[in-house]
Amino acid sequence: MKLVLDTCVLYPTVMREMLLGAAGTGAFTPLWSARILEEWRRAALKLGPVGAAQAEAEIAMLRAAWPDAEITWPPSLETRLWLPDAADVHVLAAAVAASADGIVTVNARDFPRGTLSDEGLFRSDPDTLLTGFHAADAPAIQTVALRVQSEAERLSGKPWPLRALLKKARLPRLGKALDA
């Protein structure tokens, strides 16, 4: 299954690491565009120079780890597509160009299911998607979650209960499933 990851699921870190960790288990193939990554970089600028530098480093590592994930398309593709927020059409264009199965986003209202269905796509939020992956392969997602938790604790210098970490990362159902 090929899924385009919207900027809003690549930035914040824990959500991104959970999604890419699941992709690393073979649960899906992640896709994005240069513009999606640029939106991430611009969002990180709000944190100042350190945030921008960190985003640039993370984007470089992302590109190195997933060299085939970046999608391009002819500009004419965007002219035939429509979404309620014209600024998101590039995400839909990436999905169409890649023959993706869906788009992972937290912006449900900007990606109406009917419009996506017309293009043969579905929309999923990361919590639902990851909870489904957990149901299909609990040990693999548990391993990913523990790795993400360990890194969060290393970076913050404090303990993070897994369920609390995932709730803060807008993945509450996954946290509950992993806690069961």
Image: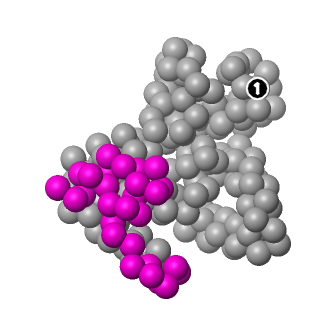
Q: Quadrant of the C terminus?
A: bottom left
Is 66 within the magenta?
no
Q: Position of residue 59 (x, y in %)?
A: 67, 65
- Give the magenta-colored segment's residue range: 153-180
Residue at horizontal 61 percent and vertical 56 percent from the top: 11
In the picture, measured across the screen, residue 66 lies left or right of residue 92, that is left
Q: Kindly identify which residue carries mark 1.
A: 86
For the stretch drawn in magenta, what is the main secondary structure?
helix
Task: Confirm whether residue 24 shows in the render.
Answer: no
Q: Is residue 73 above or below residue 11?
A: above
Task: Confirm whether residue 14 shows in the render.
Answer: yes
Judging from the image, the colouring scheme is: one colour
Q: Secondary structure at mark 1?
A: helix
Of residues 12 and 38, which is closer to you in this image? 12
Please name the amino acid that badge 1 sits on: Ala
In the picture, measured across the screen, residue 158 lies left or right of residue 161, that is right
